[in-house]
Amino acid sequence: MKQEAAPASREVKEIAPGIIRVQLPINFTGLGHTNMYVLEDEHGAAVIDTGLPGRAGWAAIRSGLKAVGVPLGRVHTIMITHSHPDHFGNAARIADVAGADVLTHESFQIWWTPDNHTEGIIDDELRDRHHAARGGRMPWHGASDRRPGGRRVRAWWMRNIAHRMFRSPTPTRRISDGEHLTLGSRTLQAVHTPGHTADHLCWFEPATGVLFSGDHVLPTITPHIAGIGAGPDPLADYVASLAKTLAMPDVSVVLPAHGDPISDLVGRAASITEHHEQRLDQMRAIITASGPITVQSLAGELFPKRLMGFMAESETFAHVEHLRFLGEVERVEVDGRILFGALPN
Ligand SMILES: [Zn+2]
Ligand SMILES: [Zn+2]
């Protein structure tokens, strides 16, 4: 079993001085836990990422904090690495109980909530994609893919379910890249790392060399590159973010949101990069052999049947769009279907 899929350990562990890891149980897209990191300081504690809502997650937060002697009311800051529910799930509840600040990247945007904050921060194409996705229309759907009416109803229904299941946190402070955060005698630096999502934010503590990587770098799983909710070319963003992370001086250890600490950032980054290069090569070969092809068919060639679905299509779309931005493929709409075909080089 991959370490990210392992059930939450009950062990509350001090990973670096004053940095404690509490694992919160989740069962979500193949993951078994979210790491919540507790950073103690003179005024109380900050937590990074808060798992999924529900009784088990909440109980793990309570018992984890109790084990380190931090009452919930002493949590003054909640840092959310990105807009996925396994990271922000309990943030609103903790903020309510503890009166804590909620910190996110300035472009933080949950897809089912109204978008009032990102004007001027994210580009228009990304906003358009957010809005289209809210209506159930993915950018790889051609007009004939599915009945638009049904799609709209399903998207409305999903938004409503999501609203009820996941109370969305309200950021009290939106952070920009490079900003410094002082927590008592600790100082952390925000590192914007778009790719997995457009609003992904890592945190670096220069004094200890600890990098809190969220889902940007994971120990054995390649972080999902989403075709929606990320930039126009999220794979290029991701690769650039990885390079930015590698260029940071003195990273001693990477603490991911799922799985164990990573000591070899360079090696891990190299194997993630290699995975994407291989996938692009596979895609080039398939498109050359098949001629113009839909994202759904392309995903069917790349992913085993059990993994087919929205995430496979979204990841495939991100890769084929990357090839389009490289000038290797073109996107055409034929009879209401969106197809990607090779361009002569
Ligand atoms: Zn994520
Ligand atoms: Zn995650």
Image: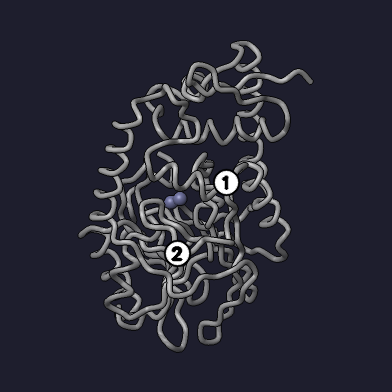
* Label 1 crowd bin: few (<14), some (14–19), many (20+), radius 10 Å: few
At mark 2, the secondary structure is: loop
Return the disc, 2 or 1, that comes first in the chain's sequence: 2
Residue type beneath disc 2: Ile
Answer above or below: position of 31 versus 295. Answer: below
Q: Against 201, is 338 above or below?
A: above
> How far across and how far down the image is residue 2, in percent?
43, 41
Point 66% across, 25% down: residue = 330
Name the image quarter holding residue 14. bottom left
Q: Is residue 115 visible?
A: yes
* Residue 221 visible: no
**Circle 2 residue:** 80
**Which part of the image, by quadrant, shows the C terminus?**
top right
Q: Residues within 10 Å of mark 2 (few under 14, many from 20)?
A: many
Using the image, tell me which numbered label, if any, was put on residue 125: 1
Which residue is the extreme one toward the bottom?
42
Q: Position of residue 201 (x, y in %)?
A: 55, 61
Is 309 located above or below residue 173 in the figure?
A: above
Residue drawn at x 48%, y 66% is 104
Work out which quarter of the rendered image holds the N terminus and state it: top left
* Type of amino acid under label 1: Glu
Residue at position x 28%, y 69% in the image: 93
- State the residue in front, 206 or 146: 146
Q: CA distance from mark 2 to mark 1?
A: 25 Å
**How far across and how far down the image is residue 19, in percent?**
48, 72
Q: 219 left or right of 145? A: right
Q: Which circle, 2 or 1, is nearer the viewer?
A: 1
Q: Is mark 1 within 8 Å of ligand 1?
A: no
Q: Is residue 102 left or right of residue 273?
A: left
Single out the residue that lies furthest toward the right. 345
Quarter-of-image position of residue 91: bottom left
